[in-house]
Amino acid sequence: MNYGVVSQEQLEKIDAILTEKLIKIGVDCVIIIDMAGNIITAKDNGTSKYDVYSFAALAAGNFATVDAMAKLVGEQEFSLLFHKGTDCNIHFSKIDDELLLITMFGKNISLGFLRLNVVETIERIQKLWG
Amino acid sequence: MSFINLREKIVQVKIVYYGPGRGGKTTNLEYINRKFSKQIQSEMVSLKTHGDRTLFFDFLPFNMGQIKGYELKIQLYTVPGQVKYNATRKLVLKGVDGIVFVADAQEQMREKNIRSLNQLHENLRDYKESIFRIPLVLQYNKVDLRNQGIPILPISILEKDLNSKLKVPSFEGSALTGYNVAETLKKIISSTVVSIQKKLQ
Ligand SMILES: Nc1nc2c(ncn2[C@@H]2O[C@H](COP(=O)(O)OP(=O)(O)OP(=O)(O)O)[C@@H](O)[C@H]2O)c(=O)[nH]1
Ligand SMILES: [Mg+2]
């Protein structure tokens, strides 16, 4: 697919997947960005409001940095990128070479459960573009 | 590469300020941030060292309002100019739509400008982009120093050094006083928008 332009229909399908698999299990906010730091879509639970544009720029930079470090030590990639806080955790996952899925979640969800749902989310999004 | 959201009718465009260390890239963004506060909804993000040198990038989202029914969001970035930071400089260039090259017009900076521009050329090539195709504007910064008797390169020399092959729009400027900062920005935005429209056709 040409990721630079996503159709309305594709976006609606993606949003439905994000809502069903992530927002419904209690994730605060989920964002899909490209590696240049553009936002593809953002969904939240209605109570958390982040400055998603700055967040996307920083997240893309963060991911790119870690990716470059992986290459320096001879790794293909570090598959898990996760930041743990007291009230908020951030989890990064690659959808494909161009897209990243970022989820922000609190204490109420375990990392294992979240990862399971992220994997399923990504599989379903990849199928959309298959 | 710009990202277009057809549902919310938003176009995101990435413009990067590139150039040698201490050339005035961050100062350009700081001036824009002060001067156009109405068009800027969030804080400028600066990842910098204690000595105020850019470590990774500055980021400033700039709202241009509606163009042909689309809301235009311009994402302004700077790269770190210090020679040792080329790896991070390259990361910031990922997906760039338009570039402002900020040259330092002081005589002593002549070599550094040329070297930085050559490296931009190489860095773009690594992304399969071309410095001859991407929208580009040159800014010959710090011309205010003329008034303090500091030797400044004549524009003809700067044009010959940096713009003889590229032949892109260029401005003398002073990021410190704001001279031609907005003009530089307007020019790169319009060149970039035209180039995106062409790609979409
Ligand atoms: N006189 C004068 N000084 C300037 C001008 N623009 C920037 N400076 C000064 O030059 C120094 C470096 O400016 P920065 O904007 O931090 O330079 P930079 O290109 O972001 O530098 P790096 O982040 O290291 O790449 C600062 O002390 C600025 O105040 C200008 O137009 N005139
Ligand atoms: Mg800087």
Image: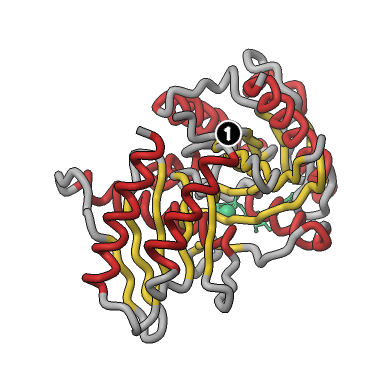
Q: Position of residue B90 (x, y in %)?
A: 43, 40
Between B153 and B44, the one nearer to me in the picture: B44
Neighbourhood count class around disc 1 (C-alpha, 10 Å): few under 14, some 14–19, many 20 upward: many
Residue B72: image quadrant is: top right
Q: Is residue A31 visible?
A: yes
The amino acid marked with disc number 1 is Asn
Chain label for disc 1: B
B113 sits left or right of A34 in the view = right
Answer yes or no: disc 1 within 8 Å of ligand 1.
no
Between A46 and A111, the one nearer to me in the picture: A46
Q: Position of residue A48 (x, y in %)?
A: 55, 76
A125 sits left or right of B97 in the view = left
A13 sits left or right of B69 in the view = left
Q: Residue at x 34, y 39 (%)?
A: A127
Quadrant of the drawing holding the C terminus of chain B: top right
Q: Residue at x 41, y 60 (%)?
A: A102
Answer above or below: position of A92 versus B146.
Answer: below
Answer above or below: position of B79 versus B152.
Answer: below
Q: Is residue B146 visible?
A: no
Q: Residue at x 34, y 84 (%)?
A: A107
Q: Position of residue B108 (x, y in %)?
A: 61, 38
B93 sits left or right of B148 in the view = left
What colour scheme was applied to this rendering of the protein? secondary structure
Residue sitting farthest toward the left: A74
Q: Residue at x 60, y 24 (%)?
A: B134
Residue corresponding to mark 1: B113
